[in-house]
Image: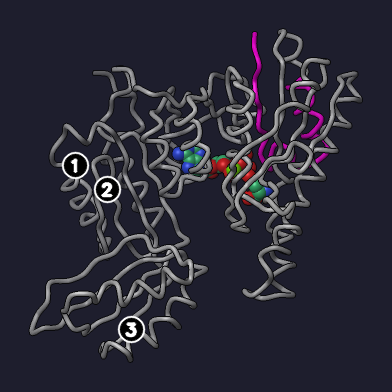
Amino acid sequence: MGLIVQKYGGTSVGDTERITQVAERVASYLAKGHQVAVVVSAMSGETNRLVAMGQELGGGDASRREMDVLTASGEQVTIALLSIALMQRGIAAQSFLADQIALRTDSQHGRARIESIETEKLRAALDQGIVPVVAGFQGVNEQGAITTLGRGGSDTSAVALAAALSADECEICTDVEGVYTTDPRIVEGARRLQQITFEEMLELASLGSKVLHPRSVEFAGRYRVPLRVMSTLVDGPGTLITLENDAMEQAVVSGIAHAVDEAKVTISGVPDLPGIASKILGPVGARNIEVDMIVQNAGIDGLTDFTFTVKRPDYKATLALLESVATEIGARQIIGDNAIAKVSIVGVGMRSHAGVATKVFDRLAAENINILMISTSEIKISVVIAERYVELAVRALHEAFELATESVD
Ligand code: ADP
Ligand code: ASP
Ligand code: MG
């Protein structure tokens, strides 16, 4: 028994029937004596629909402030619907928009960061046996303007709420039964992990596993919130995100992530001189474009090539910026490719195992997949490949590292 924050994702509240099922699930927890606070996403497809309308009218230049007002509306619908469904079952419930619990963020519209939450009203509701139903994804800045936390951000709302309320657990209730060795929609034999470390989960989420919003994992690690991913519809233990992995699950590779929203640009024939990286990347950073992998080739005859990746929506803006940089520094050519993908293997066990990278390269070679870029860190290896090979690469690596089979030390 204790306080549990439950977050229900888009599919889980996708229509009124599913919302009724969520109300039943909440009721079953209350019946066991738990206190429950709920965070919900917009109905599945709704945020996409709203974004598309905003873009239709405003193009890429649509005001980010107004896009946030627009997209935050999706969650307003579901908090009301779930509250109504709970009340229909005789359960006292009350919806809360971010503004009503002073869920304060910074002012970066579209990717705001949570700074604080006022818990008074939520506690008062819980104390009176009322289930608070809080809108995920949204916040308010210091001026009272609506902000949003970035796509998938309701996970972060839930973890932040759990931290603020010192909840006993935060459950991310979704359309899969936990965190799998890779996206179960791509690899049929993907295996649910009983547990995974925060460190690995943060890498997987940041590298494209959309089952958890990266910042939710960061928050849970920082505030020690017990975090569990589980299915809304199928009973089961799900996956616990833990501080330490116990020996049972100590595999070299824990999971594989992929991301297809990437693009690559190369600026070639660049003078190989001090300061060149900052001349190229400075203007990109100044436009708030996030740069991911960066590779500079060895200089030959005083010239070098410089390649980096950005998110696909930033591709055109990056190319346009580089046009003027290229003229300024006298580069030869700009080459872009926006049909690329990044596939990454992650595991804390990599720290103590050699030969992991070789296995990745060998297997991709055997599949005839050309590697365009490589980046490694202590617990991950990422490769950039052509987008059309992404599923093949994920399946091949899943097999190469025998992830479908339970590892026993
Ligand atoms: P929600 O709407 O509930 O937030 P999401 O679509 O954001 O759900 O996240 C759940 C989806 O994440 C799953 O349907 C699955 O396709 C995808 N996914 C990607 N990688 C993984 C993984 N390693 N384990 C589980 N699910 C994953
Ligand atoms: N509704 C938002 C989105 O689709 C937030 C979320 O689902 O977590 O990105
Ligand atoms: Mg999600």
| Distance between the alpha carbons at the discs numbered 1 and 3 | 33 Å
Whether pointer 1 and pointer 2 mark residues with C-beta atoms closer than 8 Å, the reply is yes
For residue 46, say whether it is visible: no
Where does label 2 land, which residue? 381
N-term mark: 1 or 2: 1
Q: Residue at x 74, y 60 (%)?
A: 50
Question: Which residue is nearer to you in this view: 339 or 369?
Answer: 339
Judged from the image, the secondary structure of the residue bearing numbered disc 2 is strand
Q: Is residue 20 magenta?
A: yes
Q: How many other residues sit within 10 Å of disc 2, few (<14), some (14-19) or many (≥20)?
A: some
Whole-percent x, y for residue 205 in the image: 45, 43
Q: Quadrant of the N terminus?
A: top right
Where does label 1 land, which residue? 356
Magenta region: which residues? 1-26
Whether pointer 2 and pointer 3 mark residues with C-beta atoms closer than 8 Å, the reply is no
Residue 8, by quadrant, is top right
N-term mark: 1 or 3: 3
Q: Residue at x 33, y 48 (%)?
A: 344
Instruction: Identify which amino acid the numbered label 1 is placed on.
Output: Val
Image disc number at residue 95 = none
Q: Residue furthest front?
A: 142
Q: Is mark 3 within 8 Å of ligand 2?
A: no
Above or below for 149 versus 387: above
